[in-house]
Image (cartoon, helix red, strand yellow):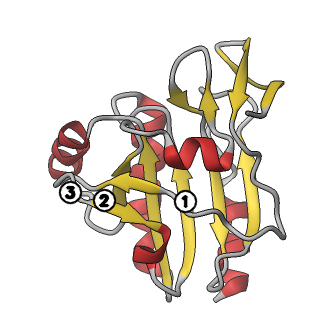
């Protein structure tokens, strides 16, 4: 198991990311996460569109909520692109969040059971069993084209750069 310390902090304190670091140019590894109805969801389910994977620690925090709502809004402007938001929140909590905030344009998924996405893309914070904040963009052939591991988990990702990268792939 790969461990990386010092790449990311949470509240100024370094955390250890575990799992395989996602790198542009590599084939995207598969993963299995859960929908709000507890159904398995894999990379194949996202189809042959460009994929923006928005990674958040928990939808119950301000920055995660804002990140999810921002991508929900941006999704209406993107063609041939699917946006997945992945956290370790329980599927029931994610479903409540989506209903309460009218999140209908992104697919919100839970990695709580196996940390499949988090381990395959290197986003698991070992100290907290949460996913670190970030963005991964895959092209239509599921090659990783952009990765951002946000340096301080409590800060926002670079939305503009991620959206520009995704738009170039359509």
Answer yes or no: is residue 134 visible.
no
* 104 and 16: which is toward the camera: 16
Residue 76 appears left or right of 134: left
> In the image, which is nearer the foreground, mark 3 or mark 1?
1
Q: Residue at x 43, y 41 (%)?
A: 87
Q: Earlier in the sequence, mark 1 or mark 2?
A: 2
Q: Position of residue 89 (x, y in %)?
A: 34, 35
Name the residue located 38 percent from the left edge and 36 percent from the top edge.
112
Q: Categorize mark 1 by other alpha carbons within 10 Å: few (<14), some (14-19), many (20+).
A: many
Q: Which mark is residue 130?
A: none
Q: Earlier in the sequence, mark 3 or mark 2?
A: 2
Disc 2: which residue? 40
Q: Residue at x 27, y 58 (%)?
A: 103
Disc 3 versus disc 2: nearer the observer: 2
Which one is nearer the viewer's eye here, 128 or 76? 128
For residue 102, the mark is 3
How packed is label 2: few (under 14 Cα within 10 Å), some, or many (20 or more)?
some
Q: Characterize the local packing of mark 3: few (<14), some (14-19) or many (20 or more) Cα atoms within 10 angstroms.
A: few
Q: Position of residue 85 (x, y in %)?
A: 44, 54
Identify the disc placed on residue 53: 1
Q: CA distance from mark 3 to mark 1?
A: 19 Å
Relative to residue 51, is residue 160 depicted above or below? Answer: above
Q: How far across and how far down the image is residue 55, in percent?
A: 54, 46
Quadrant of the image for the N terminus?
top right
Instruction: Determine the secondary structure under disc 1.
Output: strand
Disc 1/disc 2 C-alpha distance (Å): 17 Å
Residue at far top of view: 13
């Amino acid at each position: 198991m790969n461990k990386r310390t010092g790449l990311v902090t949470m509240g100024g304190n370094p955390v250890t990311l575990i799992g395989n670091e996602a790198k542009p140019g590599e084939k995207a590894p598969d993963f299995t996460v859960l929908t709000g109805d507890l159904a398995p969801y894999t990379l194949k389910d996202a189809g042959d569109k460009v994929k923006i994977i928005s990674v958040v620690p928990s939808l119950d925090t301000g920055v995660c909520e804002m990140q999810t709502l921002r991508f929900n809004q941006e999704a209406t402007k993107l063609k041939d692109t699917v946006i997945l938001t992945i956290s370790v929140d329980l599927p029931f909590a994610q479903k409540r969040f989506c209903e309460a905030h009218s999140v209908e344009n992104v697919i919100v998924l839970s990695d709580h059971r196996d940390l499949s996405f988090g381990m395959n893309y290197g986003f698991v914070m070992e100290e907290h069993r949460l996913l670190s904040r970030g963005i991964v963009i895959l092209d239509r052939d599921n090659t990783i084209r952009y990765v951002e591991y946000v340096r301080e988990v409590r800060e926002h990702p670079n939305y503009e750069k991620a959206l520009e990268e995704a738009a170039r792939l359509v």
